[in-house]
Amino acid sequence: MSFDIKSQGTVLNHPSGLFVLFFTEMWERFSYYGMRALLVLFLVASITDGGYGWERDNALQLYALYTGLVYFTPLFGGMLADQLLGYRKAVIIGAFVMAFGHLCMALQSQTFFFIGLTALILGNGLFKPNISSIVGQLYDDPDKKDAAYTIFYMGINAGAFLGILLCGYIGETVGWHYGFGLAMVFMIAGAVQFWLSGKLFGPIGLAPEKDTVADLNANFDADEIKQVEQHVKTQKSSGRLGKWIGIAAVVAISIFCLNRFGLFVSEVESFGVLAFFNKIVMSALILAAFVGIIGYIVTDPTLTKVEKDRVWVIVILTLFTVFFWWAFEQAGGSMTIFAADYTDRTLEGGQASTFNTVNTLLTVVPMIVITWVLGKLVSQTFGKISVANIILSLAFFVIWIIVIIMLGFEWGYFGGLAERFGVTLDPNITEVKASWFGILNSFFIIALAPLFSKFWDMKIIKSGPIKFAMGLLLLAFGFGLLAFGSYGIPQGAKTASVSMVWLILAYLFHTLGELCLSPVGLSYISKLAPLRLIGIMFGVFFLSNFLANWAGGMTGSYIDTIVEKNSMTAFFLIFTIIPATAAVILILLKPKLSKMMHGID
């Protein structure tokens, strides 16, 4: 490569650009997970408590719709970046659109609330697939990508940790709209910091030149450039894209008509907008997306036999990740309901002091680690991107102030400030916030990701399908623990007081499963996808999240129905049995998939 990324400085033996992406993604995940931690709780909170007073099933259906569409728009964001904008410009535009979305949600208006959700969905489509694509282009050596994506994944979870912790606490304690507004502030900081760090990336991720695709600007060798240019000319002259858009449209219309005039004909008149969209529209959209996108990719006439086999491996692994995220994403929906209404969260005396001590360590230790990484980045790059580093450092200074105030409130300090915000202080009694449990996933990832990165580098387990299967089995075990812990909840109960231990253990095993599957999945797409299709292939991987998040939220919306007719244990067993079965099938498919990878394992 004519541009040497390492000449821009290294941090922890990786290009400094990786850590710019680390912090950019961190702020975006801060905003996303901070808002997600509040969404269901805000919707079900009574009007007198500042919420909308929705029923659980409706709140979880909106959660399903939002979290599903957030992972649908990356399909088109990847295409736009590949063919028009370039990855870097797409990331910047997407970040500012999401900041606007958070601003709308901070306004106390239901109209602006839904405008904000729409902006978040659209902005994420531009941001999410393209920042992942830039990570892959920082490395010539495919073997370095597993470790790089694991570090990048720590940035994702550092943002999720801080977002859930701070937005969740402020939203539940001070006011919902303050929590939404905080997400906006740091989304803007992330966008500006990335915008001003462009010189570290050279030509990587710039807009396409010579009527071709964005990833040519990474200065790949002449054969690869010629291959991509030929591919673009072939596709534009073949009309294949229009053909598959037409096929997808026919599928969508057919499924819509089947739902509207067949399966739900007797119920449709009673549907509200939310139910109509989820039950009539979404299944048509999902199936059409899968048929159109996958059909378009696998029928590409320029794919060689090896490339086509590898693309099919990505498709198959994508389908199995659906089962993982379908269960995992109960965290923001039914598991949040379980934390709020079925978990004993009130601690007194010594228990309260113990929790506050643990919570302080859980908060301060990761903050110190992340601040140390920030210091390493600043020391390597301040001469090149000084303004970006100043903005990033100021953002962290504000985060530290908010953390200190939050912990002070929990320990009974800053009484005057607490009174001003309407917060009641009692260091002898602590009510753990329902959103707090969401930080456990992020904390465990921050703590364990370096160990997993080292473990993968040892190459004891090399097979991608086996890593995916391990993730599914660990996830299933976590839900098995929740099912066991819920055994004493009476049938039909609306509230209970189950020990927090079961949720904590569930989050631990879910996180272990996630570390086996998600960063490895990103790395395998980068390894397996042909250069000319890398952007859209990341979009295909996110397509699994589209289906899984929507289906997970819709399944979670039946929590009351299942508990009334069976039990809470039966509800959680659903998420135990299905992922475990998928893992067994994937293990059986491993020999065939390994053969189709043609040397990449």
Image: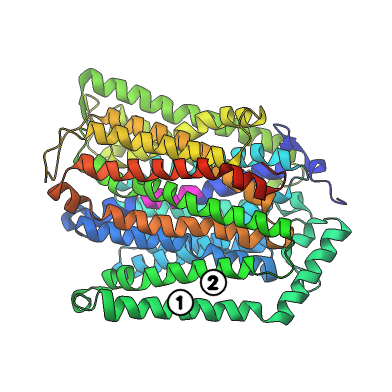
* Residue visible at 69% across and 70% down in the picture: 83
Residue placed at 48% from the left, 64% from the top? 72
Q: Who is closer to the viewer here, 556 or 470?
A: 470
The image's colouring method is rainbow
Q: Circle 1 sits in a helix, a strand or a loop, which is it?
A: helix
Are the residues flagged by discs 1 and 2 in contact, CB closer than 8 Å? yes
Residue 20 location, quadrant: top right
Q: Nearer the viewer, residue 148 or 116?
A: 148
Q: Is residue 31 magenta?
A: yes
Q: Position of residue 207 (x, y in %)?
A: 73, 66
Q: In the rendered structure, which segment of residues is drawn in magenta? A: 29-36
On screen, residue 125 versus residue 423, left or right, reads: right
Instruction: Between residue 130 and residue 322, name the one nearer to us.
Output: 322
Q: Is residue 405 magenta?
A: no
- Badge 2 marks a residue whose secondary structure is helix
The answer to whether residue 99 is visible is yes
Image coordinates of residue 405 in percent, x first then y, are: 38, 35
Residue 246 x %, y %:
54, 81
Distance of label 1 from label 2 (alpha carbons): 9 Å
Q: Circle 1 sits on which residue?
A: 251
Total labels drawn = 2
Q: Quadrant of residue 541?
A: bottom right
Q: Earlier in the sequence, mark 1 or mark 2?
A: 1
